[in-house]
Amino acid sequence: MNIARLIETQLPSQYLKLIKLAGNLASQIGQNPYLVGGVVRDMLLGRPNLDLDIVVEGDAVGLAERLGQSVNGKVVVHSRFGTASVKSDSISLDIVTARSEKYPRPGALPAVKPGSIEDDLFRRDFTINAIAARIDARRFGDVVDPYRGKRDLEGKLIRTLHDKSFIDDPTRIWRAVRYEQRLEFRLEEEAERLLRRDVVMMDRVSGDRIRHEIERILREERPEKSFSRAEELGALRQLDPALPGNSWLAGRFGMVREAVVDLRSLNRVYLALLVWKLDEESLDRFMQRLRFGRETARTLREIAELKRVLPVLDQRHFAPGQTYELLEPFTIQSVTAAMFAVESVTVRNRLRAFLFEYRRARPQLDGDDLRRMGIPAGPDLGLLLRELKKARLDGRVSTREDEVELVRGWFNRSRHER
Ligand code: ATP
């Protein structure tokens, strides 16, 4: 089989030029070059993908350096892994030496040695990701598909390459679910049996690697589908027995997506909802295990505290100024998650009012006005601005004059007290 036409029609011309150049440089030094992985899979499916991964049966770093010179691009070498990336204009391309891998124990990093393209494809997660296409001029587009990935693309199946696949690398459990849901494929029967059998192995993998896969799920169009499926397969429970993946999560994720546009915030709100039902002990355990970055960790840590204070918002009488004061210390992401998570309509409305109204309200006087009125710059000034804002939210002031009067009163009182 040959997919030269597919490559030529699906890749933008600059990308095509770069891989043809890489292919020709490789063959000049007697190495066989291939395009592999997700980009080949997606080309065969007609899905856009510009993640160019190249494998050479030979020296990847040497090839990357030659390519870098010839396009005047930037070359980054990871000599420990025998991999390199070349960046030319805005296009980047990864080159690795074909290799075989052996896993010393479950979840550990593999021992690696140079190998053939067949070896390299065999170390991959699923047959649909184990298809390569030659990119040297003489055999451009020739497909290497020793594990019948194309058959599985046609049958819409996620199939592992051997029965120890999930044991060698349990992060593949998350990858299987992600591909299955993204592509609307199905785990092949034996692969599903293996996954269910090996799901306990997930405990042997570092939290960093699991987090990485979870974050990739969160970047999918509909992450809740993967979490539901992970629940069905026992993977979510393996991460923590209290994590929900059912319709509770699905409905909320959908609403969040419509409300939150900024992607980084979206991921944090998703995660906050994912952990919403965990008790404090489980939340701590989950966070220690997955070691989130600083901002995400802050949002998640706040969930426990937020759940403690939310019942206060269920009272009949609770002024907007008080709501503002209560919620102001929290991140927008944790409050947003709470808005979608709580059952009480009263609480939800107050959270919404905080996010879309109270937070944005401004007194008419600003810091400069207060300084001109003789309030020294410092913490008092900040406090006073907050008091003004609360007074405005509660309707105690409405005009600029009202605000001036309030400030004068406050100023005189504090002078009196001194
Ligand atoms: P995406 O999965 O988001 O479409 P991709 O298919 O390019 O992107 P990457 O995670 O970037 O996936 O990995 C590139 C290739 O490396 C995959 O197609 C797969 O062949 C292989 N790979 C990645 N992770 C693993 C893994 N844990 N085990 C085996 N092979 C893997």
Image: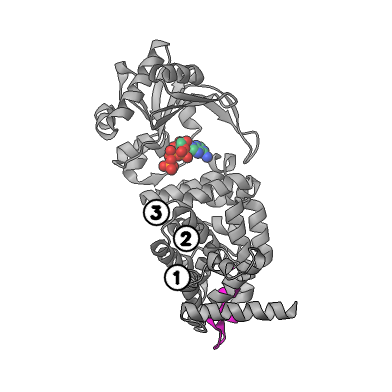
User: Going from the N terminus, do you reach mark 1 or mark 2 first?
Assistant: 2
Q: Nearer the viewer, residue 55 or 221?
A: 221
**Which quadrant: the N terminus?**
top left
Residue 356 has which mark?
Answer: 1
Location of residue 105 by image quarter: top right
Disc 3 marks a residue whose amino acid type is Glu
The reply to whether dot 1 and dot 2 touch (C-beta < 8 Å) is: no
**Residue appearing at x 31%, y 37% in the figure:** 44
Residue 228 has which mark?
Answer: 2
Residue 221 has which mark?
Answer: 3
Disc 1 marks a residue whose amino acid type is Phe
Disc 2 marks a residue whose amino acid type is Ser
Residue 130 image point, x, y percent: 42, 34
Secondary element type, mark 1:
helix
- Callout 1: few (<14), some (14-19), or many (20+) C-alpha neighbours within 10 Å? few
Looking at the picture, does residue 398 appear above or below residue 257? below
Please indicate whether residue 289 sits to the left or right of residue 190 in the image.
right
Outermost residue toward the right in this view = 418
Residue 376 has which mark?
Answer: none
Marks 1/2: CA distance?
Answer: 31 Å
Magenta-span inclusion, residue 324: yes
Residue 82 image point, x, y percent: 55, 24
The stretch in magenta equals 312-328
Looking at the picture, does residue 166 appear above or below residue 374? above
